[in-house]
């Protein structure tokens, strides 16, 4: 299945938090979008890997993505090496996305920066014809594929974006997808330990960050991304 956009996250919920509104908008516009989680989030303080599996499936349904997979890398301990790169290359060649979204280049959680670099490196390597890959159970060699561009969504840190997407009208869908991870986020009735992302302030911050980015580009809500190369447009009228 060929996708327009493939979004990677080090943990289930990273994609929703960083780019959920953009994904919801692209899906509404007829684009085919998929998600690949690198880990099951098994080291998370609240909930469990099994709970996160169920929550991730629910969030994917809310966003309307056509595929979601989990590579089951070791949470906290995966590295940017050949084995992990090849696993991601197989996903890129399987789905052949034009655009890849991935973690913030620098962030509070060490997996975010690691995941960002790992996916970015794999996107480049995936285009090399002398790297040979097959999907499990498939006898056919995969064809090389390199996405046209990699965008990094913004997470804990307030990194200055290179591109801001107008997501007015889709913030509620993003919030719904985030709150599908009920084990992780604010719940006044929960008896689980408190974490940096379980506070009401954190949940509220998703909305007020989007409002502030929207303010900066003259719309109600925005979602920001950084790029590894200059964004390109055909003409100035492509810019809002």
Image: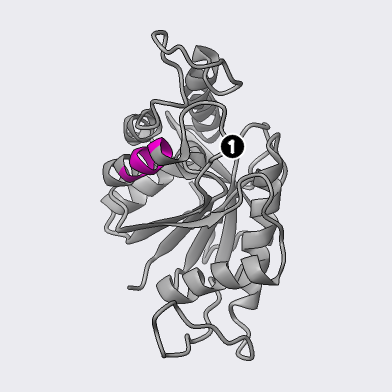
Residue at (39%, 9%) from the top-left corner?
189
- Check the picture and name the quadrant holding the N terminus: bottom left
**Residue 12's x, y, as percent?**
47, 43
* Residue 41 percent location from the top left of the image: 53, 41
Vertical position of residue 69 compared to residue 148: above or below = above
Q: Nearer the viewer, residue 11 or 238?
A: 11
2 relative position to 221: left or right: left
Q: Which residues, given as a range, are shown in magenta? A: 51-57
Is 212 positioned to the left or the right of 171 in the image?
A: right
Q: Residues within 10 Å of mark 1 (few under 14, many from 20)?
A: some
Q: Quadrant of residue 157?
A: top right
The prevailing secondary structure element of the residues shown in magenta is helix
Q: Which residue is painted at 48% across and 76% down in the image?
A: 93
Quarter of the image for residue 59 reads top left
Colour setup of the view = one colour
The residue where tag 1 is placed is: 43
- From this view, report whether residue 8 is shown above or below residue 172: below
When the figure is inspected, residue 53 is found, relative to residue 3, above or below; the finding is above
Say if residue 133 shows up in the picture: yes
Q: Nearer the viewer, residue 194 or 105?
A: 194
Q: Is residue 67 above or below residue 140?
A: above
Say if the magenta span includes residue 41.
no
The x and y percentages for residue 209 are 54, 26
Coordinates of residue 39 in the picture (x, y in percent) = 54, 50
Total number of numbered labels? 1
The front one of 39 and 116 is 39
**Residue 40 or 196: which is nearer the viewer?**
40
């Amino acid at each position: 299945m060929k996708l327009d956009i493939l979004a990677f996250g080090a943990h289930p919920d990273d994609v929703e938090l960083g780019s959920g509104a953009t994904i919801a908008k692209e899906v509404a516009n007829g684009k085919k979008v998929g998600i690949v989680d690198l880990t099951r989030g098994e080291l998370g303080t609240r909930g469990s890997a099994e709970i996160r599996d169920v929550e991730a499936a629910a969030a994917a349904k809310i966003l309307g993505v056509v595929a979601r997979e989990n590579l089951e890398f070791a949470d906290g301990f995966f590295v940017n090496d050949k084995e992990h790169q090849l696993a991601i290359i197989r996903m890129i060649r399987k789905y052949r996305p034009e655009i890849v979204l991935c973690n913030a280049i620098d962030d509070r959680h060490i997996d975010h920066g690691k995941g960002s670099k790992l996916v970015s490196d794999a996107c480049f390597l995936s285009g090399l014809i002398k790297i040979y890959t097959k999907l499990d159970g498939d006898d056919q060699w995969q064809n090389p594929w390199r996405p046209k561009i990699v965008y990094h969504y913004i997470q804990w840190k307030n990194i200055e974006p290179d591109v801001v997407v107008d997501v007015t009208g889709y913030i509620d869908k993003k919030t719904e997808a985030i709150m599908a991870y009920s084990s992780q986020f604010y719940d006044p009735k929960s008896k689980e330990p408190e974490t940096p992302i379980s506070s009401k302030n954190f949940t509220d911050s998703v909305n007020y960050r989007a409002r502030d980015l929207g303010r900066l580009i003259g719309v109600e809500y925005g979602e920001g991304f950084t790029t590894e190369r200059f964004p390109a447009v055909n003409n100035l009228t492509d810019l809002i």
